[in-house]
Amino acid sequence: MKMAVFSAFLAFATYMCDGNDKKESTDCANDRKEPDQGLVCNENVVLSEPSEQGVFAFKTTLYVNISSAGIIETETYSRILGILHLTKSPMGEDLQIELCDLLIPAVSIPGQAGPTEMIMVSNVYPELAPAQTSMTVENYTTCSDVSFPMVSFIFSAVLPDPLNDSLPDTGLCSGTSPPCITDMDNDSNPGVTFEALNVPGIDVRSIYMIMRSTMDFSGIIGSEDLLLGNSMWTIEQKAVGCTIVPLGQTNPRPCNESELDIVRKVNPRLEMVPSKAGSLIGRRTGPISCEDLLLSEDEIFGR
């Protein structure tokens, strides 16, 4: 099994420098030791030190199935950007994972004037708590296995058990104990506010959502500056409020419970395609902010 996985990573690493992209992609032309022309195994590596973090920007490419109340079901692409902060410990590597961006794809629905889209009104990623875990390292040599277990990122909710508790329907944290809902973007509405475009069957203007995203990683050390592997991923969204423009009117108002129930049913659901594991690539960057990562995505990971 390990040989099959290794062969897949080798093909991926070599493919990144195929064709005429060598001059355009930093995956192919830089001064870092990389396996872009073939992995070299059993070379010693240092991922981090007790007094100096190893910082890797990562990009996870995902194949997702999108469904909406039987109206549409299709496969498309999504991606996650984030930062791994590694610190050497007696048990391996202490790991803090910072999530920087999660792409929620637009969905084209037959008969709609445009694709159904959910656009985050305010950037709440700086307020998102990093995930804390550990990375297991087989050996500190190239081609050795590395992994970390499933972690969760909770948007605008407090859960005693972030991986397993159900997302709450109601209950602001200011008036009840967890599990409860927060106002993450401080706009006086529960949850995270999304601008809603072209929601089928109802003129929704805003949706207030809480979300949980989970991910893990299983791969190998490509070089001292490169991690390659697969990632399992989920995202769970729950609408906890919305505003609509009723038929024949022009001004938006808060949804009532029956309207909110309709929004929950038609709000597109995203699930990982079971037969297509997500791929994760991590590149050592040194200290970097989420803002800089978003601006440098193509430079760091190639086009």
Image (spheres, grey):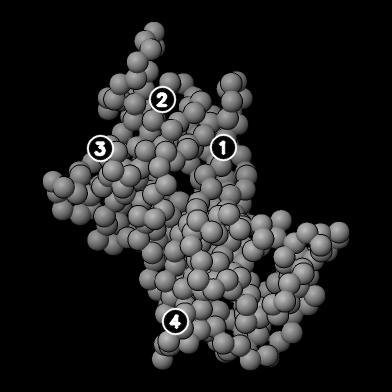
Q: Which residue is mark 4?
A: 87
Residue 256 as seen in the image, left or right of residue 1: left
Q: How many neighbours does mark 1 have within 10 angstroms: few (below 14), some (14-19), or many (20 or more)?
A: some
Disc with the residue nearer the chain's start (1 vs 2)? 1
Q: Is residue 164 above or below residue 200?
A: below
The numbered disc on residue 188 is 3
Residue 21 as seen in the image, left or right of residue 214: right
Q: Nearer the viewer, mark 3 or mark 1?
A: 3
Q: Position of residue 131 (x, y in %)?
A: 39, 66
Quadrant location of the N terminus in the rendered image: bottom right
- Secondary structure of the residue carrying tag 2 is strand
Q: Position of residue 243 (x, y in %)?
A: 34, 26
Q: Foreground residue, 254 or 84? A: 84
Seen at 31% across and 47% down, the residue is 184
Picture quarter containing residue 210?
Answer: top left
Disc with the residue nearer the chain's start (4 vs 2)? 4
Disc with the residue nearer the chain's start (3 vs 4)? 4
Of the residues shown, which amino acid type is indicated by label 4? Thr
Q: Are marks 3 and 2 in contact (CB under 8 Å)?
A: no
The numbered disc on residue 106 is 1
Q: Which residue is mark 2?
A: 204
